[in-house]
Amino acid sequence: MSVAYPSDLGLATSGLGLEACDPNALEANGPEACPPDSKMGAGSALVEVPFGPEIVQETVTLGLYAAPSSDGYIHLAILAHGAEPVIASVVLGGVLHPGQLQITVPPIASLPGAPDVALVSMHASLGGALTYYERVGRRLVAYHPRGIGLPASCPRGGWRLSAGFSFTDGQVSRASTAVPCPPGHARRRG
């Protein structure tokens, strides 16, 4: 999946993801395997799991963590954890490019011989109520990262976002929306 966002959002200067979390350790051991300063956000997803002739829906929690990067872009490890009716965790990979977030959702096996788990919907946000820690002298001091900075002005009609989805069967789907300008935020003409 690919999400396009305004390239002038302050993701690189957000103060999020100061440390990296190993995606393999995250999948094997959960969030406890990650440094606190690697958490970048949270969310949830709705999945459908086939059980014989029945399809069961499950809500999974999402944790977004900074992952190691070798190319200068911000990489994400997204932990998807389900607890009922199926207890399972999987890590999705993501990369933040200027103006675009790409997330790879691998095929997720269900029961032997049954179709894969289907991702129906996803909601996630970067930033939010996160606590990071900074060493000041001999003490660790808690603080809240600034989060994503907004551009100085907002375009007429708000910030435009779009998403594209490519499925394993070759189908594609696209959606778009606009996020309204906050009250009192300077608006661009045109």
Image: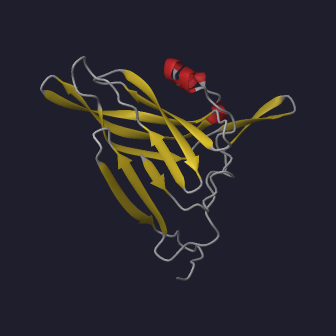
Q: Is 171 left, or right, of 136 in this rendering? A: left
Q: Where on the picture, by quarter, is residue 84? A: top left
Q: Position of residue 43 (x, y in %)?
A: 44, 41
Q: Nearer the viewer, residue 118 or 46?
A: 118
Q: Is residue 15 left or right of residue 87?
A: right
View extreme (front): residue: 170
Q: Quadrant of residue 44?
A: top left
- Residue drawn 30% across and 43% down? 170
Q: Residue at x 62, y 43 (%)?
A: 74
Number of numbered callouts drawn: 0
Residue extending furthest right? 137
Q: Position of residue 154 (x, y in %)?
A: 56, 72
**Residue 137 x %, y %:** 87, 32
Q: Give 77 or 41, whichever is nearer the viewer.
A: 77
Residue 41 can be seen, yes or no: yes
What is the image's colouring? Answer: secondary structure
- Write the residue at 28% across / 28% down: 116
Quadrant assignment, res 18: top right
> Looking at the image, which residue is at 62% across and 66% down?
151
Q: Position of residue 180 (x, y in %)?
A: 46, 68
In the image: residue 163, left or right of residue 151: left
Residue 127 appears in view: no
Q: Residue furthest left?
A: 53
Of 21 and 129, nearer the camera is 21
